Structure formats: structure tokens, C-alpha cells
Image: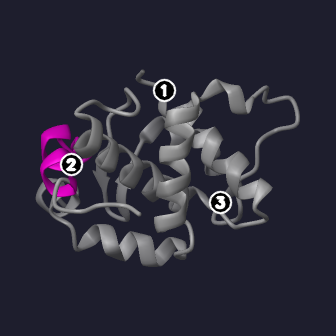
Amino acid sequence: MTYSASTIAKWFVAWAEAEAADVSNLKLQKLLYYAQGHHLALRDQPLFSDAIQAWSHGPVVPAIYREYKRFGSGDVHLDDDDGFRWEDVDGRTAQFLIRTWNTYGGYAAWRLRNMTHDEPPWRDAFRPNVNNVVIPQDALKAFFKTRSIA
């Protein structure tokens, strides 16, 4: 099943809240990138349908950035009336997301940002002063085939 990036982002935000952990918009963007990359590599299909773009601070899903930019550099939280439910994500995918969180969630946002800058999917796609450059799913898949998550 392919989700919207919004559903996966809300899962990460809800998980961070449940774990009393920090998750800023910057960190959330990198978690989405890593989740998408590993999912493509492991399951040969995207986790979510939205494109990831190469922005100056690393990979970004623009709609998610806009959805949470009101939080600035602070922690992102779901609105009380958001309606997200854990059941919005199937159990197999939830287990995959927990593995992704356990691998990357302990890193600070800027550490994740710097990690993505050293990786070919972002590095090969990024063009200074050029907007809307999509990181190809094939590039994500190829790179993450060389990496695994616990």
C-alpha cells in the first residue's frame, strides 16, 4: 500500500510525541527521506506518493514542509482535532517505521541534514538556486540497496 506523505509524517510526529522525543520540521523531512529510501530498497515500491525534492538543507517533501512550517525550528505537534489514528498505517508498515525511527530518530535534525548532504541521492540532484528539483526514486532505491536498517 502506498500512503500519502502526510499520513507517514503524522505517524512520525505521533510516535515522537508518544516517546517524548523531539521532532522538528527539518528532522521530519529527513525521516521521510530515509523511510522512503529504505522502503523503495526493501519492497520495490514507494512508501508514499509525494515526490522528494533536493533543497538547500537536504531532502524535502514540499507539502509536508508547508504543513508544519508554522512550528519554525521547534518541535512539531499534531493539532488536537487532527484525527490521526495509529490504524491509519497498517501493522507491517508501522513495524518498518519503528525500525526507521530506531535507526535515525535518535539523531539531531542538523546531524541528519548533514548526513543527507553526504549521500548521492541529494548530492546528485541538488542544484544551487534551482527550485523544485525532484530526487528520482531510482536514485533513492539504488543508494538504499547498499544500506540496511536494523
Q: Disc 1 versus disc 3: distance between alpha carbons?
A: 23 Å
- Say which quadrant the N terminus sits in: top left
Q: Disc 1 versus disc 2: distance between alpha carbons?
A: 18 Å
The residue lying toward the viewer, choosing from 65 and 120, is 120
User: x, y (%) of residue 95?
Assistant: 54, 44
User: x, y (%) of residue 136?
Assistant: 17, 41
Image coloring type? one colour
Q: Nearer the viewer, mark 2 or mark 3?
A: 2
- Give the residue type at disc 1: Ser
Residue position marked by numbered label 2 in the rendering: 140
Residue position marked by numbered label 3 in the rendering: 72
User: x, y (%) of residue 53?
Assistant: 30, 45
- Say which quadrant the C terminus sits in: bottom left
- Give the residue type at disc 2: Leu
Query: Which label's residue is closer to the chain start, 1 or 2?
Result: 1
Q: Write the residue at 43% across / 40% down.
A: 62
Horizontal side of 19 relative to 47 (left or right) equals: right
Magenta region, residue range? 130-144
- Give the residue type at disc 3: Gly
The residue lying toward the viewer, choosing from 54 and 22, is 22
Residue position marked by numbered label 1 in the rendering: 4
User: x, y (%) of residue 63?
Assistant: 49, 35
Horizontal side of 124 relative to 80 (left or right) equals: left
